[in-house]
Amino acid sequence: MKKLYIIIILTFVALNTWAQTTVKGKIFDAITKEPLAGASIFVENSNEGTHSNSMGAFNFTTHFTIEKVQVAFAGYQSVTVTLTGKELSIALSPTSNRIQEVVVTASREVQLRREAPIAISKISSKQIEETKPTIINELINKVPGVIMTNLTNEQHMMAIRQPMTTSPYFLYMEDGIPIRPVGVFNHNALLEMNMYSLNSVEVIKGPSSSLYGSEANGGAVNFITLKPSAIPTVRIGIQRDNFGYVRTQFSGGSYVNQNLGFVASGFVAQQRNSWLTYSDYNKYGFNLRTDYRINDRSKLILAGSIDKYRTEMTGSVDSSGFYNRKYQSNNEFTFRNVNALRIRLTHEFEINKNSELVTSLYIRNNDIEQLPSYAIKKDLNNPTIAHGQHNDNAFKSIGFVSQNSTKLKFLNSKLITGLSYDYSPNTYWASYVSITRDTKTGFYPSAVEHPDSVLANYKANIANLGAYFQYEFSPVQRLKIVLGGRYDNIRYNFDNYLPSTAFTGAPDSKNSFDSFTPKVGLTYNFNPDLGAYANYSRGFCPPSVNQLYSGVKVPSLQPSKFDNYEIGGWATVLKKWLYVDFSFYQMNGFNEVVSYRLVDNSTESRNSGKTLHRGIEYSLNFTPNNQLSFRFGGSNVVHQYVNYEVSSTLNYNGKEMPQAPHFIANAEITYRPSFLKGFRVATEWQRISSYFLDNGNTQRYNDRTLFGLKGVSTMNFRAGYNLKGIEIFGNLMNVSNELYANNATLGAFGKSFTPASPRTLTIGLTYQFRGRQNQ
């Protein structure tokens, strides 16, 4: 009898084992091929399944006899995959109508957009891939309420809840690490970015100093770079336009084994004989990242980038040259030369299933040498001469950011704490350049440097210690409250190597700036497709080293502070075809540093007292089917001086700030016909309304362009066809060949313009090799 029982048991075990099905594979992004961690893999109509790990891999066994599994991940189209008996390689495609579903910048870690009580926009890998940008502003300007102004040859300035400005109110980051230290802001800092290394871009609008520290006031832009791909991937490409721009580029990588992966990307670009004279430039960039999994709980990431840039700096164009389309540079000697190196080592450690510690160590080495066209000052007493300078601004940094995230059972809460330190010695020198001027043409035919006439020569050791926390909890279902704050201590140790009689004659000094920046926010999700948020946040920004010391005798600038009040929401409606997002905000600025133009056409930094920044930002994405999608983003804003007294007899109280358009919009419609798989065509519209050019609001940039609208109104057209990894594409920018200015200013000698490119056609070819995939 016992033998019979044993036989029955063994038979049952054998049959049960025989009936089991093992499912294993990896899941990754269909565009970037990066592994997707946390994707759901499950048997249809059952509770059996699993989630992908940090490498995108999964493995589970089921007692069901199955032929297919379902795969889902937030922000991606769900798929059903047929089992083949082999390891699966599953590519998920990003959705078009919910591209902002997952973000990382709101809390320095991955979270759902609907849980973040801030205005944040995401440019996805799909948008980057289809835009095929020549310069970064072609991406950034898709974000509602944002203007990244092209000042030629990738030089730029920004407007996020601010006028178009060169002031240090925007924080630029690469994978959450600022690309520059506090106090050494440069409005052209995004020159140092490799577009071909990008996975996505996230933009926080409004102060985020409570998490990222000073300078994150108008907004913070986080460039998230590529990770090693789940399958071997290599991509190469070339593109050129009809005005002498050529760029070749590559990227490639994979996991070598289950523990080690790498990705590399780079490009070489050059501009020759453009529509604008004296505007040739060269740019090179290379990024390398290696991921190494030490064990199931620990991972190392080593990433680095090198960027080199040199450009001729054409001067602005006067009214005659602009309106007659005679884009003649006023000089042939100005230049900018940039060398940038960044390296970081990140350790991700899972302390337990509820707690994670991420620590990044980094170094930077940056140098900008230039003889800038914007620094040319006309002599008020002698019209045949002008004055300029040759300068070099360099820094070397070492620092770290360490953050712990712990989930707590109490009120379904999470506590994030962090500590950061940055030490950046900054050196600056400048020598005088005498310039001759042709009074008939306004051209500067020659310049002579005087090395013995030193205008500035100093060193400032910058130290920034920051500590922050963020506590999230849910007192009731659907409601999440976020409390946060950060303390920053910033010290400048300034050593001047020149006497007090020099152009920069500020005495040796030690300046310290301390600030606590709080944040309070909440989100309420009525359902998974409808939510609202509100927040209060404070921003803080000390004057930069250059603003504080260069060209002055005694430092006088005070730190700027901003109080931001905001409400917003989002909804997905019409069978999830339509996604809408909006925010109302009012930001009050105190001691905001503004650029005041002097009679010789030069500028100096001054505190303005009190300013007001108020507006509404809104966006919608409409995707009725897989063939058609429509995107619109816009903002209506007011930027105003509340209290700005220049002297006892002059104030600008109640005046609008210069270069502050009331309306900004960007819209795009894309068609991907089902009858021609791999083909896409898109039309984009960029709109910037007119704006004042001076503090007194006496003159405007008010030209009429497309559709009779005043300011900027231009159309762009993009098309591409991808067949078996080979893609040919074309971008036609400024389709109607509008005459408009990317930037207009008013000086002592009249208006000057940075003209936008005339109609420009860029064509390109890319080839992508990738390993086997099931979807």
Image (cartoon, rainbow, N blue to C red):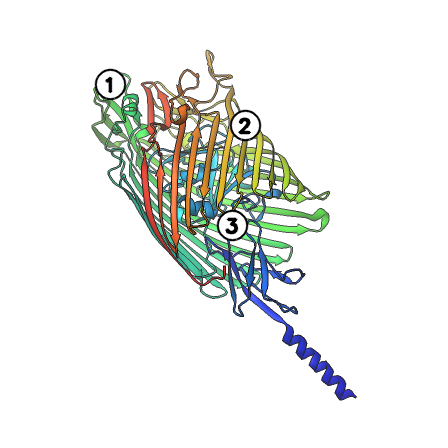
Q: Which residue is mark 2?
A: 615
Mark 2 belongs to which amino acid? Gly
Label 2 secondary element: strand
Question: Which comes before the other along the chain, label 1 or label 2?
Answer: 1
Nearer to the camera, 477 or 538? 477
From this viewpoint, which residue is outermost toward the top?
649
In the rendered view, does 180 fall on the left or right side of 52?
Answer: left
CB atoms at circles 2 and 3 under 8 Å apart?
A: no
Query: In which image quadrant can residue 367 be found?
Result: top left
Residues 355 and 159: in front is: 159
Task: List x then y, in percent, for residue 661.
Answer: 46, 25
Residue 584 visible at all:
yes
Closest to the observer: 182 or 464?
182
- The picture places residue 218, in percent across and down from the top left corner, at 50, 33
Q: Residue at x 46, y 45 (%)?
A: 127
Labels 2 and 3: the sequence-earlier one: 3
Q: Secondary structure at mark 3?
A: loop
**Residue 355 figure quarter:** bottom right
Quarter of the N terminus within the rendering: bottom right
Query: Are dots 1 and 2 in contact, CB under 8 Å?
Result: no
* Residue indicated by mark 1: 383
Toward the front, the furthest residue is 675
Amino acid, disc 3? Pro
Which residue corresponds to mark 3? 94
Q: Residue at x 56, y 42 (%)?
A: 577
Q: Secondary structure at mark 1?
A: loop
Mark nearer the viewer, 3 or 1:
3
> How many angstroms separate mark 1 from mark 2 (CA)?
44 Å
Of labels 3 and 1, earlier in sequence is 3
Task: Give me the disc on residue 641.
Answer: none
